[in-house]
Amino acid sequence: MFGRVQDVAALLGRVAIAVVFLAHGLQKWDMGIGGTADMVGAAGVPLPTVTALFLMAVEVLGSIAFIAGFALPVVGIGYAISGLGALFFVHLDAGLTGQGGYELVLVLGLAGLALGFNGGRLSLDHLIFGRRRAAAGKADAAWQNA
């Protein structure tokens, strides 16, 4: 019973985090690669075009994958990079709280990272890879008992 509650909580957390990243990613999508590159370049981010492509991919495609529970660790690391980049390049001078503070990007990035490695059983990753791990564990146990 408690495991099901944990899985539903992880799913709800993944959806909430992904919706926020998706909203920001769609804003970047609307600005296009050039507009997004100009924005991140003005913030002092190195390689602005590469960064723009990375952010758009993580925040749009990654968010769709995160909701479905696919490639969770990869997307979680992408969220952490995105959040920490925003923290250091855009929000750090404003402090933790208040106008322009970094509390939101810190929480979003690190919650995405945590859920990326603990996304629950209601995910495609569990459906695809969880069964393989379970089968491998049974094979190892059978081999050790032989």
Image: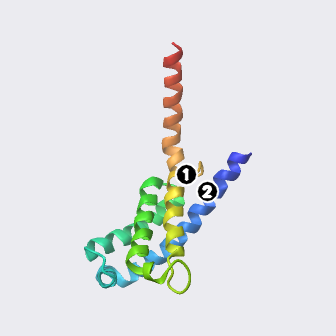
Nearest the camera: 104 or 75? 104
Report the residue that reaches farthest toward the right.
Answer: 1
Residue in the image at 54% along x and 26% along y: 138
Residue where numbered disc 1 is placed: 118
**In the rendered image, which quarter is residue 33 located in?**
bottom left
Q: Position of residue 38 (x, y in %)?
A: 30, 84
Scheme of image coloration: rainbow
> Is 46 displayed left or right of 6 in the figure?
left
Nearest the camera: 104 or 18? 104
The disc placed on residue 8 is: none
Nearest the camera: 110 or 34? 110
State how far apart marks 1 and 2 are (Cα). 7 Å
Q: Position of residue 52 (x, y in %)?
A: 32, 75
Q: Position of residue 143 (x, y in %)?
A: 48, 18
Q: Secondary structure at mark 2?
A: helix
10 Å crowding of disc 1: few (<14), some (14-19), many (20+): some
**In the rendered image, which quarter is residue 145 located in?**
top right
Residue type marked 1: Asn
* Count of numbered tags: 2
Point out the image quarter for the N terminus. Answer: top right
Are the residues at dot 1 and dot 2 in contact (C-beta closer than 8 Å)?
yes
10 Å crowding of disc 2: few (<14), some (14-19), many (20+): many
**In the rendered image, which quarter is residue 35 located in?**
bottom left
Vertical comparison of 2 with 57: above or below = above
Residue in the image at 52% along x and 41% along y: 130
Nearest the camera: 72 or 41? 41
Residue where numbered disc 2 is placed: 10
Earlier residue among tags 1 and 2: 2
Residue in the image at 30% along x and 80% along y: 44
Q: Position of residue 41 (x, y in %)?
A: 29, 81
Residue type marked 2: Ala
